[in-house]
Every structure is written in C-alpha cells, then in structure tokens.
Image (cartoon, rainbow, N blue to C red):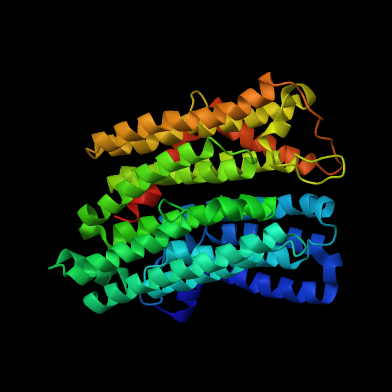
Amino acid sequence: MSYAANLAMTLPELVLGVGAIVLMLVSAWGGPGSTRLVSWASVAILAGAGIALTGPAGNGGPAFDGLYRADAFAAFSKVLIYIATAIAILMAPGFFQRTSGDDLRPEYPVLMLLSAAGMGMMVSATDMLTLYVGLELQSLAAYVLASFMRRDARSAEAGLKYFVLGALASGILLYGISLVYGFSGTTLFDGIAAAYAGQRSMGLLFGLVFVFAGIAFKISAVPFHMWTPDVYEGAPTPVTAFFASAPKVAAMGLAVRVAIEAMGPATDQWRQIVIFAALASIVLGAVAAIGQTNIKRLLAYSSINNVGFALIGLAAGTPAGVAGVMTYMTIYIAMTLGSFLVVLQMRDEDGQPVETIASLSGMSRTRPALAAAMAMFMFSLAGIPPLFGFYAKFAVFDAAVAAGLFPLAAVGIAASTIGAYYYLRVVKTMYFDEPVTAFPRFEGEVLQGGLIAVAAVFISPLGYFAIPLLGGWAMAAAQALF
C-alpha cells in the first residue's frame, strides 16, 4: 500500500494535528484576545475531522503495516469523541468568563484538539505501541486541562492527582505490554491473538491482567477509580464534562478492541476480570454516591456506575455485546453532557459556581425548565422507562443474557436499583424541598440552553425513533472487530 493511501486512512488525526499546530501559532500571536476565534475554529476542525471519516478513514482497513486500522468501529467511536469534544469547547467561554476572568486562554481548545487526536489513535490502534502513544497524547493534554484554572487550588490539586495516578497507571499498562510482547514476540494485535490461541504461558496471562488493569484506570472502573471524584470536583466544570464523556468513549473503545482483537482467544480469562470490574463499579458507584453533597462528585460516582453497566456488554464477548456497549456509550454521552450543562447554570449572583445538591432546592419553581431537564437526565441515568437511558441498559443486559451470563445480568439489574436512590434524591430536592435563592440568568446562555434542549430531546421517548439507525450503525461497528 502506498504512503499516500496510508495517510488517507489517518486523515482525521492529520486534520486535528495540523489544525492544532496552526491554532497554536494563532494563539501565540493573537494572545488571549484570539480565544473566541480559536474556539470556533477548533469546533470547525473537529467537524472537518468528522467529515474526513466519510472517505478511506471511515472504512479503509489496516494502515502502516497493521499499526493502525480505519474501520467502522473506529469511525463510530470517533464521531462520539468529536461531538463530545466540540460541546466541551463550546461550554467553556461562559464558565471561565464569569468564574475566573482571564483564565480561559486560546490554549484550551488547542489542548482539546490534541487530546481528540490521541483518542482517535486509541480507538484505531491495532498495535500495543500505537495504543500507548495515542493514550499518552490524550493523557498529557488532559493533565494540563485538569489544572487549567491557575488561581484555583482545587484545580491545581486535581491536575496533580490525575498526573501522579495517571503515571502509575501508564506504568502498569507498559509492564503488561512488555510481558505480552516478551511472551508473544510481537506487539501487533493479530500476532498477540495467535499467541493466545496457542499454548498460553503464565507470562501471557499476567500480561493480560496488567494490560486490563491499566485500561481500567482510564475508564475509571473499580478498583482503579480512586482519582475520579477528586479530579471531577476540582477540575473546571467544562473540563469535568469532557473527562466524563470523550475520554470515556475512547478508553472503552480501546478496551473493547484489545479484548476482542488482541485477546479474543483468551475470552474466558479476561471475562473474569471484566465481570468483577463491572459488578464492583456498579455497586461502589451506587453506594458511594448516596452520601455525596457535591453535584460534581455525585456525577463522578454516576460515571463509575455507568462504566460498570457498559462493561456488562463487553463481558458478553459477542457482536451483540459490543454493539450494546457502543449504544450505551452514545446514550451515556447525551445524558452526562446534558447533566453538566445544567450544572454550569448553577451560579450565584456574582457568577461563581455553586455545586451543592442542597442549592437545587425548589428549582422546579425558580427555574422550571432547567429543573425539568435535570430531572429527565437523572431519571434517564437511573434507567427508568420510558426515557432513552432505559434502552441503554436493556441493550447490554440483553446481550449478556443472550451470551448465557444470566447471573451477571440478574445481579446488574438488582444493583441498578441502588443507583436509582441518589438520582431520585436530586429530583426530590428540586421538586419537593423549599426553594432557596434562585440561580440568576446571565447573558450568553442561549447556546448552553440549546444544547440542553437537544440532549433532553435525544434522551426523551423520542430517542426511541433513533433505535433502527443507532442499532444498525452500532452492530456494523461491532462486526468490524469479529
């Protein structure tokens, strides 16, 4: 295959990389005054990367001698990543302008683009080293984003915690990769799969455990979830919304591709790890959220809880299970971004963020439309019909039952009732508690209000009309791995 054909299949990453470099130069010359221009240009570049997926980059096959694969699975993941990244960029100006004055600089959207390029490499990687390079590119940008508010001690603390624990997870992952390479003789997924299909040594099984442990950190699955609540609470809210959406999709896509393509013959071995992580994440995410008083920490535990449900689909190890995971992540992104967009509206008279759940008291009477949207997101995250979040859980449980994992599905369904408690507590606070000071309305909220409305419509019963399209696309993406 020619070098030009290889480059054509990596066109989305090229668009993002070149765009980030150009905008970095613009921000260097334009200074803080170029922030708005760079932000909108970044959204346009993300749209351009999405359009590039319609060509060979969307379904061109292997590139660069098997280091990278452009297929339907990667294209599905990248569309979700680009949408979530674009929304995180659009959320930022209003938040930073009222919260910290001049803290929003044009480097913010540039870092988002670089992170998106890394995430694109993660979901297209078919080699352990390509996987690691993409993951580190995403992570390095994320460490800076977490501590982006330089004058805020919480933000600096979040960035430091994320960096230290992220470095530990990278070391665990690299150790696992080195074991897999040492005992299989290759870093290519096809060669690793052949090694697992043969006589498996103890070293290969240890490598599998360490690789999945490193990936579990990136998706914040129990027991590697410890960074999530502190980082979500301390990071700027638009950054927290970003962490809860795009990197989650990329890490889950990475986990699915490694499990199915690289370690498919060892399904019985990695399934045990995935089942434990799924159930532990569901239970801990639900139980630990009950006592939270900060809405961002509650959403952090909600994120851990939802990762557990998505992993149930992966545990099935079938095309239907993978399709269930991708369907779940699509709906999860809409619910999570919608929730964080509502959190952005929680501000006092001075425009400073208010993050306590108690501050939502009586919001149904002071901001009825906002309360209705938040209630929809909470009910949907809890999986209560007829909202679209119910279908997300149904898809992964159905795949688990079809694969014969009846006990896993039964325990998952039972544990989901625990999580319903803290979601309902938020709704109860908004609709039944006495009103406190109303959140004031500020200029420039039209865009955020429009995004909230779009997310609310998508997770409403109207979302079921998208099932034929979404289900067909998710199944096509899943089939590309088998």
Query: In the picture provided, is 35 more to the left or to the right than 407?
Result: right
Judge by depth and name the residue closer to the eye, 96 or 448. Answer: 96
Residue 367 visible: yes
| Residue 262 visible in the shown view | no
- Judge left or right: residue 202 versus residue 106: left
Estimate the x, y position of residue 113 in percent, counting from the top left.
63, 65
Tell me the quarter of the image containing the N terminus. Answer: bottom left
Residue 239 x %, y %? 65, 55
Near-viewer residue (352 or 470)? 352
Q: Quadrant of the C terminus?
A: bottom left
x, y percentage for residue 397? 34, 35
Depicted 425 relative to depicted 189: above or below: above
User: Quadrant of residue 423 in the image?
Assistant: top right
Where does the image place residue 311, in percent across and percent down from the top left?
A: 37, 46
Picture mark count: 0
Residue at image location 68% in from the left, 52% down from the top: 238
Picture residue at 44% right of the left edge, 66% below the top: 169
* In the depicted structure, whether residue 291 falls above or below residue 49: above
User: Which of the 4 image quarters holds residue 40?
Assistant: bottom right
- Toward the top, the furthest residue is 432
Q: Looking at this view, name the residue that lies furthest to the left.
A: 199
- Residue farthest to the front? 291
Residue appearing at x 55%, y 66% in the figure: 139
For this rendering, which residue is in front, 246 or 468? 246
Residue 91 placement, left or right of 4: right
Is residue 219 depicted above or below 438 in this figure?
below
